[in-house]
Image (cartoon, rainbow, N blue to C red):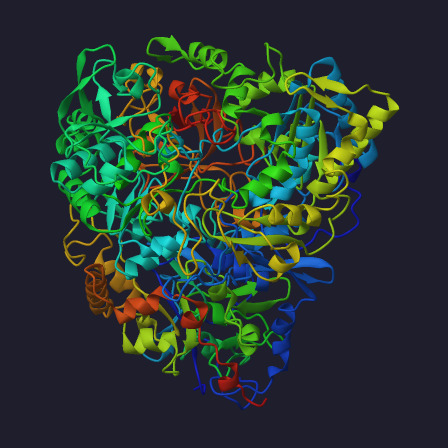
Amino acid sequence: MNDRNNPQKPFSRRSFIQTAAMTAATLALPGCSRNEKPVLTTLTGDFDPLRSYPYRGWEDFYRKIWTWDKVVRSTHSANCTGSCSWNVYVRNGVMVREEQAADYPRINAELPDYNPRGCQKGGCFTEYVYSPQRLRYPLIRTGERGEGKWRRATWDEALTMVAEKLLDNIYNYGPDTNSFFSVIPAMSPVSFCAGSRLAHYIGGVFLSFYDWYCDLPPGEPLTWGVQTEACECADWFNSKYIVLWGSNISQTRIPDAHFAYEARYNGAKLVCISPDYNSSAIHADLYFRINPGTDAILALGVAKLLIDRNLIDAPYVKEQTDLPLLVLPGTKRFLRESDLKNGGKEDIFYFWDTKQQRAVPTPGSMGSEQKTIQLNGADPALTGTFQVQLAHGNTAEVTTVFELLKKEIAGYTVDRVAERTGLPPNEIELFAKELGTRKPAMIIHGAGTNHWFHNDLSNRSLILLVALTGNTGKNGGGFNHYVGQERIWPEQGFFKLAFPETRKKQRFQNTTLWSYVHSTNKDPHLYNGKPIEWYIQESVKNGWMPLWPKNGRKPRAFVVWRANYLNQAKGNEILESSLWKDLDLIVDINYRMDTTALYSDVVLPAASYYEKVDINSTDCHSYIHPFGKACEPLFESKTDWDIFHALAEKMAEVATRKNLKPFHDDAFDWTRDFTQLAHDWTGKGAIQTDEQAVDFLLGNAEETKGMTYKQIQEKPKRFIATDPESWNSDIEEGVAYTPFKHQLEKKRPWRTLTGRQQFYIDHPWYIELGEALPTFKEPVAEKYPLYWNTPHGRWSIHSTWRDHRAMLRLQRGGPIVYMHPDDARKRGLQDNDWVRIHNEVGHCVCRLQILPGEQPGRVTMYHGWEKYLGFKEGGWQSLTYIKIKPTQLIGKYGHVNFRLNYWGPTGNNRDIKVEVEKAKV
Amino acid sequence: MSKHQYAMVMDLNKCLGCQTCTIACKKLWTDRDGTGYMYWNNVETRPGLGYPRQWDRIGGGWKDGSLQPSPLPTMDDYGHAWEYNYEQRLYEGKKQPVMPSPEPKSGCNWDEDVGGMNEDENYFFYLPRICNHCTHPACLEACPRKAIYKREEDGIVVIDQDRCQGYRYCIKACPYKKIYFNEVTGKSEKCIFCYPRLEKGQVNACAAQCPGRLRFVGLLDDPESPVHKLVLVHKIALPLFPEKGTQPNVFYVPPFNPPKRENYGNSIQEDPRVPLDYLIYLFGPQVKDVMVRLEAELKKTQEGGRSEALQLLIGRDAETRFHVRPEFVQIQL
């Protein structure tokens, strides 16, 4: 290898942990040429090694391997939702291995504990730290983007280049041309906030991630008015009926899956609903090999069975859901106070009280004076039609949402559902019966279902099942969605650190929309006869969704950290040829050379997970624990906190040198003096170090008040309380956390327009598109024969660990696509063949594995493969493009308003089809 | 015979196939020169090729008091430890994608999740494997150097890394093919049941780090230990290939799979997804009784009752799953 061409070298240390390549490649191991059975008469001593052995001094050989000088607690920041506390073992200044700290405190004696939390990927992160992919020095691109030609730069040079460009953009093109992308604060909020604070003080656009990656279940904001709320995983053990719906917990919830399998030994039954017979299905009591994209019809068919067989929890439904609310069938809108009284409110709704035989305002809606949903003796009718007198004097017939629902799902008979889903009718009926009778029952929901175009409809249909059966808000019950580590427990403290002048003074942007509009992505489908562009225009015009930069300008600078935007983007080849070309500066801050870094202009080397101070939390458990410095940042890397601090200082220096006048940002009436940027960024000097940032965050949140970084270094700590602003249940001593106890037990209104779990959305677009109620719609797919399924898998967390040698050796060494034997036979394909996967968007070339558990008519490639590894051509995103669902563009409807990562169009990716053929290689 | 015997039980109904055990072991013990291809602990999908390929069919073990012949597995049978040239693509401006070398044609986990077909339905389960630390180890008998011994205090079988000459008779003799040749040191190596950890009161890395929490460790002769209870009291854990005659000290709770299509509600004994013959092949004829017992326990608990055996398999905490007794097994050397 020519080291002179490699800016990562000279690098005098030997490549760590390099194992010798085995030379006897395909031959039998040499030696051992004697007979099979050795001659035991030629023994080397008079002893019987079965009983005792005289030469045991050598045993220290292995004892010495298990030694270390130092142990430091840390964790990983890969958005796995694991949030696992690890000990890193350091010997001679080298991080040699890691092992789960396994010291999460127990919730109670009955519940299994959380130890040991971790997986195989966390167990070999140390190899990344010293790998060739590890970024060692600031690099500046010398070739084309993505070519891999660099020169090594000093920090000063690299930061100056970035600082000057960001400032030029602000003064010449507007602050909204600087865009910032980083994901998932919960996995390392200090690193996240380092950059978000800079974006905040320079007026940059902060991009979303949870909706863009389609991990947001839009049915939750629609039905519950929340982002995502799930029980912590220990609560699975409290269940008597667990339905794994599109969630392969054995692969994607490795640290938590035991709770489900242990619950089974404690009396739960386990159902697995998935198109492929997978590593979670093998442990189920009932396996449903469902046709892809048909989850909603199964759920609605089961809802019909629950209703028909009277397996619903009527008191729960009457109090907690909008099913008893009255609707005017003519307009298909809720009956509102404004219909009944002149000057009446738009956000007061009615049910029919069977006791008083009249329409009564429902307590707890957005316009209600009552801040409770307590019925106070009323008995809302679920069924029937009623007469009400409208404000202008006419009477009108009204009916309930429940009646409309029954009508909506009347066609979902067992036979029709069985036919469409491919499931046996008798088992669908058994499933409905058990779901209605085994209590508590929960759905564990995953990306397998959520990544479809009509994810909002399937979410709402599934949530309906656990509402009808009265399971939501109870330990061991509910609809629990786990995709992405989106929820940060000490949320209010995080907001203060991330956006110090409040979120109102921050430009936020949904990334799905941004990526679609600022690229040549084109969805050819029509929705109700109109292209998506029409809906986008309307949405932006109505102020439902923001679109930065404004007025048709293009983004000019793009700063990415803690993320791999380009590799993970739907239609990344389309983005590369359009959005990417419009960007003048792409900066990537990273500890490893991922695809986005490779396609950047400036790469800044960041500290790895074992070289920094930060904290970590997840919805999967109720503890907080830290990152720690097992070593100081290696080579010339710096922590994210120090990098953005240095960038703020550099920008202030450039502003001073160029004598830049303060910039008046009209959008917020904010005069920004960039010569003071470092002063602002550090909170006027109060938060200089990452440890101070941690303590600031912890101290400003109800969940962690009184905790310090030093304390949580000793042991993970359980949250002490929940902020009612952010959460819907209390943290209770000795009880696993599950959401919505405030609603169920304290009768606090749901965070929706109606104050109830809202299954009826009477927004005009929902009514027009036939989605006011949960319904089933066919996937929006193309003319190709095979679904292109790119799920989360066990071998990577998104793209992290995709290029990791120890992980690759336990797979087939590179990307593979799985195909059912019948589909392979039809195409004349053999196992391990090179295949070309293609559709109207693009193609890639990789190897095939024949997998009998795969569903015919579908091929699977576990997602996240780096574009530069293992593909002869293209990549797994070469076949995808961005498709926006119109109903997810709405806003200003009660509880449904744009909010970063809470509400905005999802970047779905399952409704894609391909063909596969033998590749010419 | 050793004075005591450490043993392990693995509950296959809790295994995730995640290979955390594999990595825990690898990072601790085989992250050295010459060990790249070796996995003292591996997890394989069953039915399947296994690691090394076809290890269960090529020979070794005892028959009528004699060691059985076996070829040595080839490197293709183990699978190569692929190397990757990242630098040329990432830093040196060359266009070749990063590719594994040598070209992948086999691997230690090559047929992950493939399994078998029972009529038109797929079935599979994961089988984690370590050295069985047998009571009658064929490897020990086969070694012409007498460099393999059973530690008298705890029954752990180890290969003396000083005295081993690398003849590899042990590799042939082991019916589980759980001994590996280190080409750099010229010695054979294998799972050491983490004796350095056990000596300090810490359980094996594969067990300590298993997030599926399916491993139970203790002395087989300690009535308080979970392995004693699962193997000898509840009688729900069986060794692999008992007919090979080595008397393994690693035991498995045999696997269920869900019923076949349209069979939900019927007994797993009627037309099971995993053919009983295959389980008998792996665990011997006793597996029939164990499956009946396990299903009855599961049914009882799912109908609201309580099963002592399953309560133990829940393994709520490390104290339940592991009984490591360094003070008990210590001897004066």
- Front residue of B176/A465: it is A465
- Front residue of A161/A696: it is A696
Residue A342 lies, with reference to residue A843, above or below; the image says: above
The x and y percentages for residue A768 are: 30, 14
| B275 to the left or right of B240 | left
Looking at the image, can residue A443 be seen?
no
Which quadrant holds residue A349? Answer: top left
Residue drawn at x 78%, y 37% as measured from the top left: A646
| A333 to the left or right of A607 | left
Residue B190 lies, with reference to residue A666, above or below; the image says: below
Looking at the image, can residue B39 be seen?
yes
Which quadrant holds residue B269? Answer: bottom left
The x and y percentages for residue A269 are: 25, 53
| B25 to the left or right of A655 | left
Residue drawn at x 46%, y 43% as measured from the top left: A724
The x and y percentages for residue A151 are: 78, 32
The x and y percentages for residue A526 are: 36, 11
Q: Quadrant of the N terminus of chain A?
A: top right
Residue A553 lies, with reference to residue A129, above or below; the image says: above
Residue A700 lies, with reference to residue A138, above or below; the image says: below
| A744 to the left or right of A681 | left
